[in-house]
Image (cartoon, helix red, strand yellow):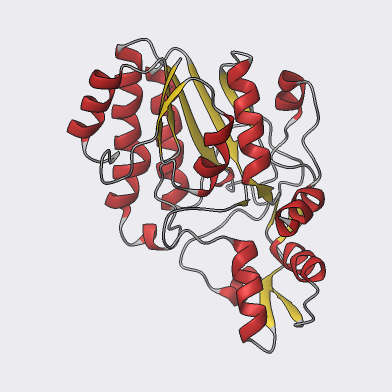
Amino acid sequence: MRILLIGGAGQLGQALLPLLSGEVWAPSSSEVNLTRSVEVTHAFESFRPNLAINLSAYNFVDKAEHEPEQAFAVNAIGVQHFASQAAAIDAGCVHVSTDYVFGLDADRSAPYTETDLPGPVSVYGNSKLAGEYFVRSLAPRHLVVRTCGLYGRSKSAGKGNFVETMLRLADTHDELRVVNDQCCTPSSAETVADAIAALIDRDCWGLFHVTDSGEATWYEMAKEVLRLAGKRTPIVPITTAEFAAKAARPRYSVLCTKKTDQAIGRKLPPWQEALARYLDS
């Protein structure tokens, strides 16, 4: 099988690459950029993949409020062309989305399933939802994976994550102030990559939620990061309003993974366990 992987230098790409079998081509962003349709077309026509995986995304949630064109160029229009090219050669199309397609239901307290109606509250969330719809409508064989709170290792410069940010700030600040009224599921790139590879191996198509299990606020995650790392920097819980980010975030965006658990034949690990493995490695 020939696999085209866009975004292989990122956190999820680095975790997924070793798990893929067959002939895998993961061009750099300078070789194939999702926003340059000519390059994407050439990649499909020259490589003729059986499976095309898109992990490339515009993830600057706050900046997207001021530059929606850039967010939609990558997360929607680029994805539209990618899915169209996959469909044109009957290739399977894998695309990764986000829990930020939810958030409109401010009173939500139960994990979202794949059948729940989305409702984004930010430009970023809307751009990612548009990308989902393009893949699901254009590529007959599609696998759309929503994930949440992703962290992992990356080859790409500037690709930080919440865990590394907390560790860095703990060494340079007398105290940390972390939001305690946004609840999601911190998810290791290794967990998500392993589940995606399993779904691919089992020819599972459609929409799937893939995260570690459990839920936490960012404050609770920060406490666990510092505890596991043996750091004693005090952490102060604050509200979303106090943090005053430019873009709105979902107050509750935990994703239900029962469909994925059943499809791959195992339950995804607790987020605390996955975080401990990440820090140990």
Query: Whole-percent x and y of residue 6?
Result: 39, 36
Quadrant of the frame with the C terminus: bottom right
Which sits in the foreground, 38 or 129? 38
Query: Whole-percent x and y of residue 37?
Result: 21, 33
Q: Viewed as shown, does residue 161 lie left or right of 278?
A: left
Determine the residue located farthest toward the top in the rendered image. Answer: 90
In the displayed structure, would residue 13 be above or below residue 86? below
Q: Quadrant of residue 80?
A: top left
In the displayed structure, would residue 10 be above or below residue 208? below
Q: Quadrant of residue 91?
A: top left
Query: Whole-percent x and y of residue 235?
Result: 74, 78
Residue depicted at x 61% and y 66%: 164
Query: Whole-percent x and y of residue 138?
Result: 37, 18
Q: Report the label total.
A: 0
Q: Quadrant of residue 61?
A: bottom left
In the displayed structure, would residue 173 be above or below residue 257? below
In the displayed structure, would residue 248 be above or below residue 92? below
Q: Viewed as shown, does residue 246 lie left or right of 164?
A: left
Which sits in the foreground, 106 or 144? 144
Residue depicted at x 53% and y 49%: 11
Determine the residue located farthest toward the left in the rendered image. Answer: 38
Which sits in the foreground, 21 or 96? 21
Residue depicted at x 73% and y 42%: 212
Residue depicted at x 56% and y 53%: 153
Q: Viewed as shown, does residue 251 lie left or right of 214?
A: left
